[in-house]
Structures are given as structure tokens and as C-alpha cells.
Image (spheres, rainbow, N blue to C red):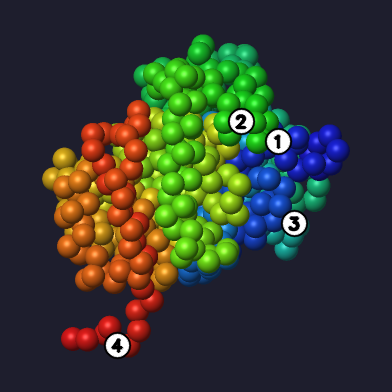
Amino acid sequence: MLKFPGDKLNNGGHIRNVLDVGCGVASFGAYLLHHDIIAMSLAPNDVHENQIQFALERGIPSTLGVLGTKRLPYPSRSFELAHCSRCRIDWLQRDGILLLELDRLLGPGGYFAYSSPEAYEQDPENRKIWNAMYSLLKRMCWKVVAKRGQTVIWSKPLSNSCYLKRDPGTLPPLCNSSDDPDASWNVSMKACITPYSARMHKERWSGLLPWPQRLTAAPPRLEEIGVSSEEFHEDTKIWHFRVIEYWKQMKSVIQKNSIRNVMDMNSNLGGFATALKDKDLWVMNVASVKMSARLKIIYDRGLIGTVHDWCEAFSTYPRTYDLLHAWAVFSEIKERGCSSEDLLIEMDRILRPDGFVIIRDKHSVINYIQKFITALRWDGWLSEVEPRTDALSGGEELVLIARKKLWTDGFMTM
């Protein structure tokens, strides 16, 4: 329906990040992986139960989430395409606030592919909903790119020109200039359109190179977070070396194809995930609330991630990740008065049996964590080394790599 050149779904690498809303067991996201497209597959823990758990068991990028009252934990312009298949979401509620949240998340010229169940094609109520959606999206300056049966694809505008031509008082209004469209942690959704600012790259695809070049190219939004292209490339280089060293240490114990779902608990600019690009795995990049502005760089590189406060539990099912990487995470939560023991227990909950943790932190932190390794049954295999100092080192560091044992009846003692 989109008729991209060469009939390539990724449009020559320009479609890379997709948001799949109400994803079920993420089969759409699984299909996209073969096209060099990565989807953040999103579904709630609702009456269908455990869909995201099943998706993660399949090794497909996915997360628990709901379109409700709070913004999704992603920065503005994170996705090139949003998708809702056999969609029964009430997009018109509260003055169209959910469609306006999609508008915030889509980049200039981004697409929204929507289909309603075929059984409702002749339903008068469904036609009424369609007409109201069409009216709202027209006022939001979106255009219909293609339509076939119960499926329609809209496109977001590339500039503010259409907004400025609307009649005074047209709803939804434009957001205030003081609103930060990238703020996403515990921020309420707003029933307004986020206009393009003068500093935004308004061309289609936000001035980003196609995939895979965008993974290592310095994105335009670096200047918004005060990072130079030189610092960006140095960060990429450092993490490339660090990851090589990690894998050298684990080489004797990693089985082929045993690591698929990976979490970087302090993603910074995405250097750790970038260094793993040649491995058959995916990385959930987690930005701390304090460093959440950097998550936009993760998405600009063609990676995915979320914002999270590690003083709280992470919204996922037990035993859903094969490897957890924690760089300076324990130091950060300790400074804020949060419990290291609680975080260790949360990591254990998330980690699969036979999975690995890589903890890189201060000597005092690693020495403290060592006391809990046996109790956690993380002593299936252990390595502790003092790494080479580099530009990212926060003083003297240690790297602890531990493997979680598969618990058996013998461990279940009272």
C-alpha cells in the first residue's frame, strides 16, 4: 500500500523504528525483524494475559505498556511508523488525546497504519468512529496516504505550515512553547499538537541517515543534549572495546545462540547496544530519569529503549532477559538513598536461569555486591577484573560478571 521503491518495507533503511500498539504476541514485530526494522511492541497486562511474556519468550522486542493518561516513556519523534492492527482502541476519547500522543512520538512525515476488524465493516457505529477519526486527523493536518478496505495509512505533516493555516479556535490546539515534548517520565498526556520548533529538522526522517549508517553517524539532536560529534564517536569507540573485553571473559561459558534478550540498565548514548550490532540479539536500552534526554539519541541511532527509575521495579515479567548490563547503576541509586539489595532482587527476578549479569561500578560497590552472590545463586560462573581506565571511567572500577544458576529442588530449603 505504501509503494516504497523496490517494494522494500524499510524504504531503503528510512523506516527503522516502529511502534506496534496492542501488539498481541508481537508477530508483526517478529515479521519486521527480517526487514531490518525493529518494533517496540506494546500491550497491557489485560484480559488476554501474558501476551508480552510470550513475545519475550519468542525473543521479540516488546514491553508492557498502556495508552492511558500518562505519556508513553519515549521521547518525541522516536518512530517512523505506528501500527495498530484489528484495532479496538478508542482513539477519540478525551478530545483525541491518544492520537495526539502518537503525533508526539512520530517523526516528520511518519506513518500511522490502522485497521479495524473486518467484521465491523458494515457496522454503523464503526462508520461513525471512522468519520470522526478522519475529521480529527484532518484537523491535525495528517493526510491519507493509502486506503484499502478496513485498513488506512495516514502520514504526519513535515512542517508547521498546515497548522498555521487552520481557522482560529480549531481543535486540537497547538501545545504551549514551554511544553517539553521529550519529557516522558510520569508526565500526563496533553490534548494538543506538538508543533515543530525552529531548531527541529523538519525534513522527512528528521535528517537521519538510513539504517544501518544511522547507527554510528552523529545524529542532529546531539546538540540538544550538549554532546559534540567528537564525544559521540569517542563513546562509540570506548564501548566497542569494552564489549570485546566482556565477551573475551565470557567466551568459555557462553553457548551459541543462548543470549537473545539483553538489557542495558544505563544506556547513556547507546554505545553498548551499538557494539553488539553484529550479534543476533536485541537490546532494551534503559535511560535513567536524570539522563532521559539522551534516550532520543538511542532512537535516532535506530535502537529502542525506555525511561526508568531503578529505585522502582521494572515493568516486565519474571525471567525475561538473558543478559543484564549495569554500568554505574548501583552508585547512582545509592547516592539517592535507594536499596542496592532491592535492585539485586529485581535484577534476579528479570534474569533467566543461566543468564548473565555484567556489573561495572566502583570497587566498594562490587565488594558489597559480592556478599550476595551465593544467596542469589549467581555463582554458576564468576569473573572479576579491573578494566583499563578510559574517558568514561568514573574513577577506579571493577567489572563483575556472574551467571545465574538454574534452581532445582535441592535449593528449595526452608
Q: In the rendered structure, are the residues bearing label 3 and label 2 in contact, judged by CB atoms less than 8 Å apart?
A: no
Q: Nearer the viewer, residue 75 or 228?
A: 228
* Quarter of the image where the N terminus is located: top right
Upstream in sequence: badge 3 or badge 2: 3
The residue that appears at 47% across and 49% down in the rendered structure is 284
Mark 3 lies on a secondary structure that is loop
Name the residue beneath numbered marker 2: 214
Q: Which of the two marks, 2 or 4, is nearer to us in this view?
A: 4
The three-letter code of the residue at mark 1 reads Gly
Q: Which of the two marks, 3 or 2, is nearer to us in this view?
A: 2
The three-letter code of the residue at mark 2 reads Arg
Give coordinates of residue 28: x percent, y percent: 66, 56
Q: In the rendered structure, are the residues bearing label 2 and label 4 in contact, judged by CB atoms less than 8 Å apart?
A: no
Name the residue beneath numbered marker 3: 121
The 10 Å Cα crowd at callout 3, few under 14, some 14 to 19, many 20 or more, is few
Upstream in sequence: badge 3 or badge 1: 1
The three-letter code of the residue at mark 4 reads Gly
Upstream in sequence: badge 2 or badge 4: 2
Upstream in sequence: badge 4 or badge 3: 3
Q: Which of the two marks, 4 or 3, is nearer to us in this view?
A: 4
The residue that appears at 75% across and 35% down in the rendered structure is 12
Name the residue beneath numbered marker 1: 13
